[in-house]
Amino acid sequence: IGISLLASAGVGALNATMRNVLRVHPFIVTLATMLSLKGVNLVMTGGAPVAGFPEGFAFLGRGRLLGLPFALVLFAVLAVAIGCFLAHHRHGQQVYLIGGNVRAARLSGVNVERVLLLVYMLCSSLAGLAGIVAASQYVSASTGFGQNSELRVITAVAIGGASLNGGTGSVGGSVLGVLFLAIVYNAFAMSGVSTYWQDVVGGVMVLAAVLLAQAAAR
């Protein structure tokens, strides 16, 4: 687990370096890294799932703490911790400043490259942790896990009020976006509607959230 988290942080550091040094657009950098790592995974595993984990590993995804699923407790603790970091820590406030206006942040004395390195490493480490919890739930790992999850993440945070242009948004809003999206997808499953319609509704919700955000900004 420790090695996996370090590797995940290393991916974030690589993305931040390419963004900071080579000045490549962040979306292109992260998309290229994602596709490359998917290819590496397929080469290493031959497309076959990885199993044989010890029983204790299943606690992360299936265990319970104080009567609650451990994964839910972990999610809540991380949401509160990162929410407090963004709201009350100096670097957290700088994240909003950089998202709103990179040039203004740099002229204000903010070390933009260092803050972006921190953000990219934190983001990739959390993605790695999510993958570990998913592997724990199934007591196996597969290259098929997490397919299209990046689109669902974008949908959730857009619904939660985060601007895709940067500078605004909150962890609390993103959590509400995740819950709303989970309720919608669960309603599809319980009503027997084809799961293919989930992507249609997800795309419409992203577009609606962006349009509403732009209207509110105006």
Image (spheres, helix red, strand yellow):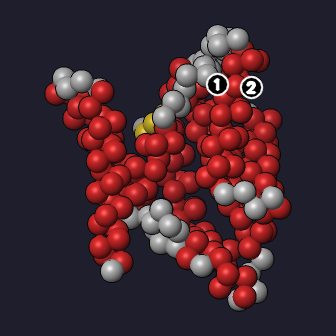
Left or right: 159 with respect to 39? left
Disc 2 target residue: 40
Q: What is the quadrant of the N terminus in the image?
A: top right
Residue at horizontal 60 percent and vertical 79 percent from the top: 101
Left or right: 98 with respect to 117? left
Query: What numbered label is drawn on residue 148?
Result: none
Asked whether residue 61 appears in the rendered view, the answer is no
Asked whether residue 148 appears in the rendered view, the answer is yes
Q: Amino acid at mark 1?
A: Phe
Q: Please state the horizontal and vertical placement of residue 191, each as a whole percent of the image.
A: 16, 27
SS at circle 1? helix
Vertical placement of residue 81 versus 2, above or below: below
Q: What is the quadrant of the C terminus in the image?
A: bottom left
Q: Amino acid at mark 2?
A: Val
Residue at horizontal 44 percent and vertical 64 percent from the top: 162
| Residue sticking out furthest to the left | 191
Disc 1 target residue: 57
Q: Residues within 10 Å of mark 2 (few under 14, many from 20)?
A: few
Q: Nearer the viewer, mark 2 or mark 1?
A: 2
Cα–Cα span, label 2 and label 1? 24 Å
Q: Please state the horizontal and vertical placement of residue 176, each as a whole percent of the image.
A: 36, 56
Residue at horizontal 52 percent and vertical 68 percent from the top: 166
Which image quarter: residue 110?
bottom right
Question: Which of the two discs, 2 and 1, labels the residue nearer the N terminus?
Answer: 2
Residue at horizontal 38 percent and vertical 64 percent from the top: 161
